[in-house]
Amino acid sequence: MFRIIKAIGLVFGDIGTSPIYTLSVVFLLLPVTYENVLGVLSLIFWTLIILPTLQYTVLAMNLSLRGEGGNLILAEILKSLLKSKRALGVVTFVSFLAISFLMGDGVITPAITILSAVEGISLIPGLPSLTETHIVLISIGIATLLFSFQSKGTERVSGTFGPIMCLWFLSLFLLGLPYLLKVPSVLKAINPLYGIEFLINNGWKGYLALGEIILCATGSEAMYADMGHLGARPIKQSWHLVFAALTVNYFGQGAFLLLNPHAKFVLFEMCLLLIPPLYVPFLILALLASIIASQAMISAMFSLVYQAISARMLPILKVKYTSRELASQIYISTVNWLFYVAICYIMYFFGSSAKLASAYGLAVTGTMVITGGFLLIIFFIKKKYKYFFLSIFTALTSLIYFFSTLYKFPLGGYWATIFAGVPFAIILLYTQGQKKLYKSMKFLTREEFIHKFSRFYEKNPKIQGKALFFIRDLNIFPPYVIETLFYHGIIYEENIFVSLIRKNEPYGITTGFLEELCPGAKVFEIAYGYMEYLRVENILREQGIDERVIFYGLEDIETKHPIWKLYALLKQLSPHFVKFIDLPPTKLHGVLTRVELS
């Protein structure tokens, strides 16, 4: 039971706050008629069945690596099944897109969630009507408090997320039920024919409405992405409860609209008319739910960026661990404040949840299309044809929704593309730049190094203690090692070459000394899952390694090529990997090597 409550608090914040704005936004495009209400409700119901239920809990959760989920996991599974280098390159490229779409979605989700909740304040009886400026300023104030709090960590308050969200979903259920009982005929919308008739009768307007209806399913990807933290079973069990609450509430909203066709803020007006004394407590609960949903997205961004750094997709950023017990509790200052500025700007630029909805959906559906495509190919290669045919259906649904959101591009949807495009460009620049840099550096082979080191170690005086050198590949030694040992003559009694190897699985850390290279030179290997949070200093101490100095390589890049100049600037602005893994600064010595890129 505890894990179900925890899952409700951590996984369903985004999809759980969608009822605040989804139907209100949809009926900005459409007149409130009986046929339209039933058609929209039918499409919402079946969207919740097809995407979060079928695509994520049934199909995606059947695929994992050591219990971990997400688009990066699907990409790794697919890579393990492919042999063609070209196909592997395409999958890698698409996984870059998936990460970028999630980051683009990560900016818009907290903005629309907080704005839509704050808009409910204007309905409080007795209060003067709030202007759009007031709503934006209050929303920015909430975002400021939320982002200022991140550096302290969420461990102390995260225990309250589950109970608050449980109360929120219970409120949604209890608020929708009375209106559903008043107009029980809305239950006819469970029949998918009403949705199909709606699309046929409304033509292009109905198709455009799909771009707003998809907002009911935003946050579905969190169900799969958080599988490793909570396990598939509690997420599936809690989804049954969440689905029931959402369905009853949406059908209740539809019934309310039929009774009150001029309603602007449907969910809040439902509460205000049904139980006026409880409106303010409900509004406070809505604000708390929106903050929790935003917090889940911020934490997901930290985790996603960390994984991308570990996978060498993004340049290094300084990471702060905010919990001694939980390694996953991290804070990345650069991400936090860039994220904050982007969200505040989006709130200011659009001014209301209705206007912001015009930018929402492109990145979300883009992620869903990639997930659907990965699932389809994986099940086909694995010859799981039952899942394969189901995945065709869900992938086509995702694709239809993606195309339905394209009309939003000139109306503000281009912001989703910009917010996704920036990390995508950085990923491409960094990964291609790293390849180019690696090819341009002059390495010594393992045999050449052992031969040269043995002679040098035997004939030259040694400094007392241990020295650590970080290398990526045990078969080649980088220029900074050669310069330090052979050109500058800095050689210690024990020289330990630490190799960090990223494994093709999410979790697990294996460490140990490999066979000695030669007298005075040892290799210590740390193999880690790409979702692990590395604390290298702790690992070294556990192995009895108490080094005197840590050497690492720095590159001074010279180039005339404009692309590589950008890459050089990116390298210059980002801290080194040794800072990312949080090594003691007093022992660190960077060795500069000049490299030319043509």
Image (cartoon, rainbow, N blue to C red):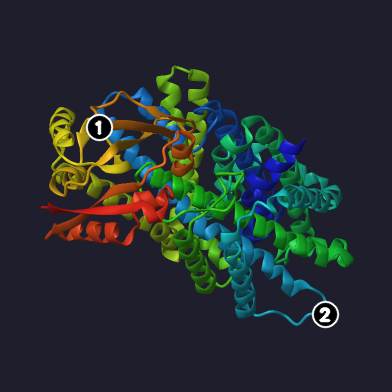
Q: Which residue is more in the foreground, 126 or 254?
A: 126
- In the image, residue 438 sits, relative to residue 77, either above or below, namely below
The answer to whether residue 225 shows anywhere in this view is: yes
Q: Amino acid at mark 2?
A: Gly
Separation (CA) of disc 1 from disc 2: 65 Å
Residue 260 shows in this picture = no
Q: Residue at x 13, y 47 (%)?
A: 487
The three-letter code of the residue at mark 1 reads: Arg
The image's mark for residue 86 is: 1
Q: Earlier in the sequence, mark 1 or mark 2?
A: 1
Instruction: Pick the residue in front: 300 or 166.
Output: 300
Instruction: Name the spot of residue 144 as percent of width and height, x first.
Output: 59, 70
Considering only vertical position in the picture, is 228 above or below 32?
Answer: above
Task: From the viewer's side, name the closer residue of 401 and 343.
Answer: 343
**Above/below status of 573 relative to 515:** below
Q: Tag 2's secondary structure? A: loop
**Disc 2 designates what residue?**
126
Residue at the farthest bottom position = 128
Direction from residue 589 to residue 400 in the image, left or right: right
Determine the residue positioned at 41% across, 64% down.
410
Q: Is residue 326 left or right of residue 253?
A: left
User: Residue 22: image x %, image y %?
Assistant: 63, 56
Q: Residues within 10 Å of mark 2 (few under 14, many from 20)?
A: few
